[in-house]
């Protein structure tokens, strides 16, 4: 059926403020906009024009510093066929990567916001359940529609869709968002990563339930782990620990300050490797643990939470990374290996490397970079949105 293009509200840019959108950056900042049309409501689809009246983009309007999140750079009717096309595209790319019900990894990110051309939307798949996480009011309004489309397009692969947006939609929008199932239901959800089984706690888990972005880096750890005594700090539910055991580690110690995460880590080890696994988990502060380690380790993983979420606290974060990496480097014997990460966006690749470099110098160790790590292909970075690159890591050889 032919549809007429709806008349979306038109927002105009101030003179000279069109450069970034012409370079396909997916955000328009509020300071770039001329006074807004009356009656505009948050979450609405809007069209953006330059000051001379030329069409530039279509996106979701939101109150705040990022005023428009762009969905398309060509005029489009933002309705079911458009969403269908976007989801189909994301599904196609994940199949191309070998992710999905056919392979040995059925937990992965299906939609990664800007990286998939859908700023404000995250969709993660854990076996039979999809978790939608809306970061914008616009996506929050269409989440039920997206849920139905997902179940239809993933034909049989997923049976339920859970909405986990309560903590991520803007609080000020007053949406009274509650987490819960949009379609289907269930209590226990499991997924496979590289053939290993994880149980996902949709309601209580961090992020959407798991740190899917470390999948390939966990595989790198499995590659290095054979015969090593591994310390996995900031272990959450034990992803790196399980990978180390899979890789043949002689001993694995897991540390996280969250007790539920530690309990889940133990359950994951038990489920995948049985009661005899050479593993112990500690619910304690990682900095304290590193100061008084109960054993000697020759492979350490540091995967702390984002120390710096904002530029203002960047300095403190740099100190945090330095301190942590220094402690690990001082502890490792010659021939030791360090896997060190930062998932903070404002801590750029260069800044992170500089912090680790300073830590190495302070520790007085000879250190080589063996590998440089990043986020996996199901967490793509739009080439027009370099800010989307947030996860970086180094594998270091220490002498
Ligand atoms: N490596 C994990 C993800 C780490 S997320 C994985 O692959 O799944 C960061 C973790 O650090 C969270 O689980 C959080 O509970 C924990 N954490 C935060 N501050 C901590 C601290 N000071 N000491 C120990 N753990 C901490």
Image (spheres, helix red, strand yellow):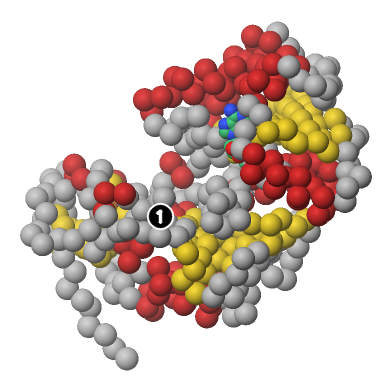
Quickly name the residue at label 1: 166
* Vertical relation: 79 (above or below) 207: below
Which secondary structure lies at badge 1? loop
Ligand 1, by image quadrant, is: top right
Relative side of 121 to 77, left or right = right
The residue most toward the bottom is 1
- Residue 222, given in percent of the width and then of the height, sits at 80, 43
Residue 289 lies, with reference to residue 41, above or below; the image says: above
| In this picture, residue 108 sits left or right of residue 371 | left
Residue 22 seen: no
Q: 387 or 150, which is in the foreground?
A: 150
Residue 263, percent from left and from top: 70, 44
Q: Residue at x 61, y 48 (%)?
A: 211
Q: Position of residue 89 (x, y in %)?
A: 50, 69
Quadrant of the rendering where the N terminus is positioned: bottom left
Quick check: 6 left or right of 168?
left
Give the vertical position of 236 relative to 370 (above or below): below
Density class for disc 1 (Cα within 10 Å; few <14, some 14-19, many ≥20) is some
Image quadrant where residue 119 sits: bottom left
- Left or right of residue 84, residue 67 in this image: left
Regarding residue 285, the answer to whether it shows in the image is yes
Residue found at x 29% / y 74%? 77
The quadrant in which the C terminus is found is top right
- Rendered residue at 41%/24% (across/down): 313
> In which quarter of the view is residue 99 placed?
bottom right
User: What is the x, y in percent for residue 381?
Assistant: 50, 49
């Amino acid at each position: 059926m032919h549809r007429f293009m709806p008349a979306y509200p038109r927002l105009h840019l101030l003179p000279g403020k069109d450069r970034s959108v012409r370079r396909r950056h997916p955000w328009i900042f509020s300071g770039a906009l001329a006074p807004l049309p009356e009656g505009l409501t948050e979450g609405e689809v809007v069209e953006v024009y330059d000051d001379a009246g030329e069409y530039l983009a279509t996106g979701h309007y939101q109150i705040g510093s990022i005023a428009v999140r762009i969905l398309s750079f060509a005029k489009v009717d933002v309705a079911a066929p458009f969403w269908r096309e976007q989801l189909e595209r994301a599904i196609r790319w994940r199949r191309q990567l070998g992710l999905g019900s056919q392979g040995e990894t059925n937990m992965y990110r299906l939609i990664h916001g800007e990286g998939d051309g859908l700023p404000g939307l995250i969709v993660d798949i854990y076996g039979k359940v999809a978790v939608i996480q809306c970061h914008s009011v616009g996506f929050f309004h269409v989440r039920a529609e997206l849920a139905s489309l997902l179940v239809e397009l993933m034909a049989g692969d997923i049976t339920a869709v859970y909405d986990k947006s309560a903590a991520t939609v803007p609080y000020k929008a007053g949406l009274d968002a509650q987490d819960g199932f949009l379609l289907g239901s269930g209590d226990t959800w499991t997924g496979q990563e590289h053939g290993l089984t994880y149980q996902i706690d949709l309601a209580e888990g961090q992020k959407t339930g798991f740190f899917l972005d470390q999948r390939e880096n966990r595989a790198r750890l499995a590659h290095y782990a054979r015969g090593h005594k591994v310390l996995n700090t900031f272990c959450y539910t034990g992803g790196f620990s399980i990978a180390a055991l899979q890789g043949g580690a002689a001993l694995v110690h897991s540390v996280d300050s969250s007790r539920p995460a530690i309990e889940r880590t133990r359950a994951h080890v038990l489920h995948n490797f049985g009661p005899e696994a050479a593993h112990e988990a500690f619910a304690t502060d990682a900095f304290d643990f590193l100061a008084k380690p109960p054993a000697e380790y020759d492979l350490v993983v540091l995967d702390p939470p984002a120390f710096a979420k904002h530029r203002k606290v960047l300095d403190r974060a740099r100190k945090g990374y330095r301190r942590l990496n220094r402690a690990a480097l001082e502890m490792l014997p010659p021939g030791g290996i360090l896997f060190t990460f930062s998932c903070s966006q404002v801590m750029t690749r260069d800044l992170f490397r500089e912090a680790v470099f300073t830590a190495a110098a302070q520790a007085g160790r000879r250190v080589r970079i063996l590998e440089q790590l990043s986020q996996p292909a199901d967490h793509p970075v739009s080439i027009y949105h370099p800010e989307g690159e947030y996860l970086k890591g180094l594998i270091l050889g220490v002498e």
